Amino acid sequence: MPERRVAITGLGAVTAAGIGAEVLWEALLQGRSCLRTIGLFDAGTFPCTVAGQVEDFSPRDFVPKSYRKATKVMARDIQLAVAAADQAVKDAGIVTRAEDGNNMTYAPGRLGCNIGAGLINPDLTELGQAANTAVADGTFDLRLWGEQGMNNLTPLWLLKYLPNMLSCHVTIIHGCEGASNALTCGDASGHMSIGEAGRWIQRGTADAAIAGGAESKLNPMGLLRQSLLKRLCTGRNDDPAEACRPFDTDHDGTVIGEGGGLVILEEMDSAVNRGARIYAELVGFGAACDPGGVDITRPTVGSLDVAVGNALKDAGIGPDDVGLIVAHGTGVAGEDAAEAEAWAAALGQAVGSVPAVALTGTVGSLYAGAGGVETIVATMALHTQTVPPTVNFTAPSDGCSLNLGSQQRSGPFDYAVSGAFSVGGQSGAVVLKTYQP
């Protein structure tokens, strides 16, 4: 990314490890799994009862008092994004409308927002109660539903479940009146949102942006869908902390996690002039898709090797310059194998010597929230020159040449690459660099 440089100055994470990027980072450094038995609802009849659940969470704690009523029309995905944005803004030390609309660090029209989201599942209890009013003689009547059943839903019901509402609420709260977007590309959404927001700043469309992703599939419908896709670990319900094992020889499925990660991107000179703490620099972005399309019978990583290669090219570096890989690592055997192959194709012989880490053993699979959180971890690793261990990794699965470890490792390294893929066939990757004036 030539010309205008892009600084990462704020980190906001909401995961099963807790609220804040520092809490997540400490859990990773400690090699601690935050996976637990599902408590948000009764999952006892599902084949997998383990998840990475955000505990003791209320969205009201992360919005201005004047906006608290709006939390009633926020699905959990939206709530997680709003909380992550609040954390990122405070960490960056910028003033937005949430704090003081008359003294914002950036003019509203120069502050953008780009948040990756999933396809939000409606609350089944809420929907079921309304649907029950359209039952006649024991049968659901579509005509009756149209005449009266749907009237038993709140008029603002749909606004809770549109994926663009993550960006919508964040832009309203923080006064982002510049470029705005919402991407729904599965697990690749976070990387793609950060990369696109970086482009805005690079070409002068915005001076700063809130970017990343958030999602929660931790509900009956989300759990059911992942179960039907046979992606979930079903053999460790009695030992939740050991359930998700990315790239491990004993991996047998993923675990749903909920959460999100948002970062503050700023034009470098602006960040320097205001005395900001600069964690790292965003220097490369790449995206790709699987030309074969979606085929759930075969693992696909959305041409992740192409996305990583494009990101490295954009950064102007080669495989030997990479000092850290933050991999996606779902823990699904076929997906792990395909991802490891993609990293090897992108980095060649360097793949075996570059330290790598995957996060799912700690917080579970975060889907649209994954890319933002993975980018935050890559940023923290560069900033501290530390590579955290990969939780639940003991020995590599067949064909995995990634250099994962069960212990902390230290730098020095100048570049980190993070990439993710979706089962829908998309992929995205970003390259970060240690800050150098």
Image: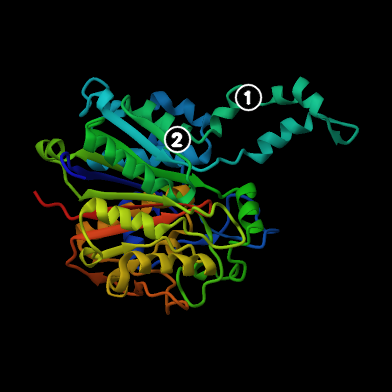
Label 1's element? Answer: loop
Label 2's element? Answer: helix
Residue depicted at x 41% and y 51%: 288
Instruction: Identify the coloring.
Output: rainbow
As drawn, the label of residue 111 is none
Among the two numbered marks 1 and 2 on one chain, the one whose residue lies closer to the N terminus: 1
Query: In the rendered image, is residue 93 in sight?
Result: no
As drawn, the label of residue 154 is 1
Give the image location of residue 244, x and y in percent.
50, 66
User: In front here: 358 or 182?
Assistant: 182
Residue type beneath disc 1? Thr
Using the numbered discs, state the Cα–Cα distance from disc 1 to disc 2 in whole angstroms: 19 Å
User: In front here: 336 or 264?
Assistant: 336
Residue depicted at x 23% and y 34%: 203
Q: Say whether residue 119 is left or right of residue 47.
A: left
Q: Which picture quadrant has residue 174? A: top left
Q: Which picture quadrant has residue 7? A: top left
Give the image location of residue 165, x and y in percent.
47, 32
User: In front here: 97 or 314?
Assistant: 314
Q: Say whether residue 300 is left or right of residue 84.
A: right
Give the image location of residue 275, x and y in percent.
11, 40
Q: Which quadrant: the N terminus?
A: top left
Residue depicted at x 47% and y 33%: 164
Give the image location of residue 137, x and y in percent.
91, 32
Q: Say whether residue 258 is left or right of residue 318.
A: right
Mark toward the viewer: 1 or 2: 2
Q: Which residue is mark 2?
A: 166
Quick check: 369 above or below 72? below
Residue type beneath disc 2? Leu
Q: Residues within 10 Å of mark 1 (few under 14, many from 20)?
A: few
User: In front here: 162 or 16?
Assistant: 162
